Image (cartoon, rainbow, N blue to C red):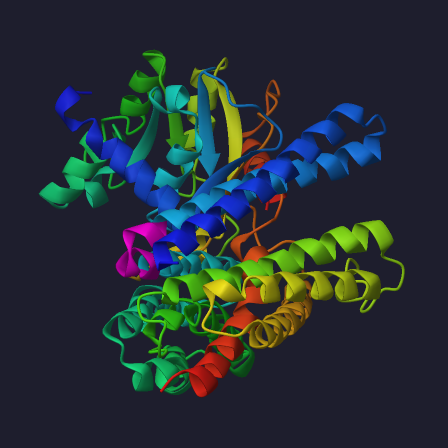
Amino acid sequence: MADDTRWLPKLLVFSVRALVGAAPRWIGSAPSATQRIYFANHSSHIDTVALWSALPDEVRARTRPVAAADYWHKDAARRYIVTKGLNAVFIDRSRAQRDVDPLQPLADALARGDSLILFPEGTRRTESLPGPFKSGLFHLAQRFPNVELVPVYLENLHRCLPKGTLFPVPLICTVRFGAALGRIGDESREAFLERARSAVVALA
Amino acid sequence: MSAHDKFLWLMGGIGVLLATASLVGWILARRISSESARAVIDNLNARVRAWWIMVAVFAFAFLVGRAATLVLFALVSFFALREFLSLTPTRSGDHRAMSVAFFILIPAQYALIGTGWYGLFSIFIPVYAFLLLPTLSALAEDTEHFLERTAKIQWGVMVTIYCISHVPALLMLDIPGYAGQNALLLFYMLLVVQISDVLQYVFGKLFGRTKIAPVVSPSKTVEGFVGGAFGATLIGAALWWITPFTWLQAAGMAFIAVLMGFLGGLVLSAVKRSLGAKDWGSMIKGHGGMMDRMDSVSFAAPVFFHLTRYFFTV
């Protein structure tokens, strides 16, 4: 990340902490520089920055949120924030180019040793509990068997900035980190995704 | 003695008090051996440390001036409302009403104090916010638990914004012979109420036997209340020289502030429990949340303000 834009991530982290607290609760795992995929429930635009702010500085520097290209590339301001501020990895939800693997940018980031923040539902929900997970997490888990899969539950964020609203309500939010998912040999995709979802729900 | 000299004496006194408390806490921490006593002493020391910080923040704001004091209390209201609404179950239909409470009502209420517009200050939230907030929720077309939801939001706004704003509202009062010293009166009221809380806690821990309201607040005892109220009233009377009151009037005002503070602690403890929580939050180490420290102040401030206004202003 270029030096001249270092203020932006600091500003994002500061604003989110001042507004909603975003205090971490390490319930099943401890903060660590181990390479991880953090996967969480998704209900507001603050989710990404909230989870990112809850990580210790040195861990945050190597952790990149996964952002939807169609949404965050809409205008220059959004693109600036998400690339310069969050150092995000983009995923193409539209799958316009059918022959390209949409997970490739994520796999590249993992191959470089970065950790990822992923919202496996693929979109924001109005409820606090997560809906069904998409299969991206399963494929990444198979390709990178040594990366820890850490479930995260974002509490109260669906009340702070629900889908369709413009102004946030600054309620106290906590970020709960659970124990890394165990790996089961030849688990089916459906079983794995349901187990991952339950791990997030269990933290609620 | 000038207002500045009085302020220095007051801060010196508080400094000595806190230094003594820190020393006693340090000695107790070295002597204690049992596990349960250790928890009590650790909490005591955390509370004393938090007191140093709170006193420093308030003293700094008072020295900088009126605007800084208003901003400080606006922040206190902000954090208190944040704790209140975080514990309150609301629905997405309340989103706009809550946004307005945080980003319009808080700045507006404190701006009214800044401009000295007493008339609107005193009815802005009980009348206009009371009518506006449910309107915003009704427009969201969600009738599920509508009355409960709007009542809870209004209650939170009344306690955390309206009531707490009566602390810096003391700066608005025009008290004959006391010009330029209102900040001292503000400090006086906070000091009496907080010392009463501290003394009630200490007397309760030492001599507490008879619980007043075991269901609502198990730590409140008759012995703690009597000791704390008596001690705080005595201190309030002894500090008459920083107020516009005679020593007898100061004793009376202090006693009323202490009594209201006790009731505030009791009522807000019941509110907290009905919302299913033990502490309002965790932002002040050892004490809990902002509302755990401001509960008694929120009840004492409006009454202290109005009594001062009726009997001591022109």
Q: Is residue A135 above or below residue B69?
A: above
Q: Residue at 37%, 85% (x, y): give it.
A: B123
Q: Position of residue A59 (x, y in %)?
A: 41, 21
- Viewer-side residue, A15 vs B299: B299
Question: Is the magenta region chiefly helix, strand or loop?
Answer: helix
Q: Is residue A23 above or below residue B9?
A: above
Total numbered circles: 0
Was residue B65 drawn as part of the magenta stretch in this picture? Answer: yes
Left or right of A185, for residue B86: left
Q: Is residue B183 visible?
A: yes
- Viewer-side residue, A75 vs B281: B281
Q: Residue at 68%, 29% (x, y): give it.
A: B26
Was residue A70 drawn as part of the magenta stretch in this picture? Answer: no
Q: Where, by quadrant of the figure, is residue A144 drawn?
A: top left
Q: Is residue B46 above or below residue A104?
A: below
Residue found at the very far right of the displayed protein = B209
Q: Which residues are magenta?
A: B61-70
Q: Is residue B278 visible?
A: no
Residue found at the very far left of the displayed protein = A76
Q: Position of residue B134 (x, y in %)?
A: 41, 82
Q: Residue at 33%, 78% (x, y): give it.
A: B174
Q: Residue at 86%, 54% (x, y): give it.
A: B207
Q: Where, by quadrant of the figure, is residue A78 drawn?
A: top left
Q: Position of residue B251 (x, y in %)?
A: 62, 72
- Viewer-side residue, A14 vs A50: A14
Q: Position of residue B223 (x, y in %)?
A: 83, 62
- Viewer-side residue, B131 vs B51: B51
Quadrant housing the N terminus of chain A: top left
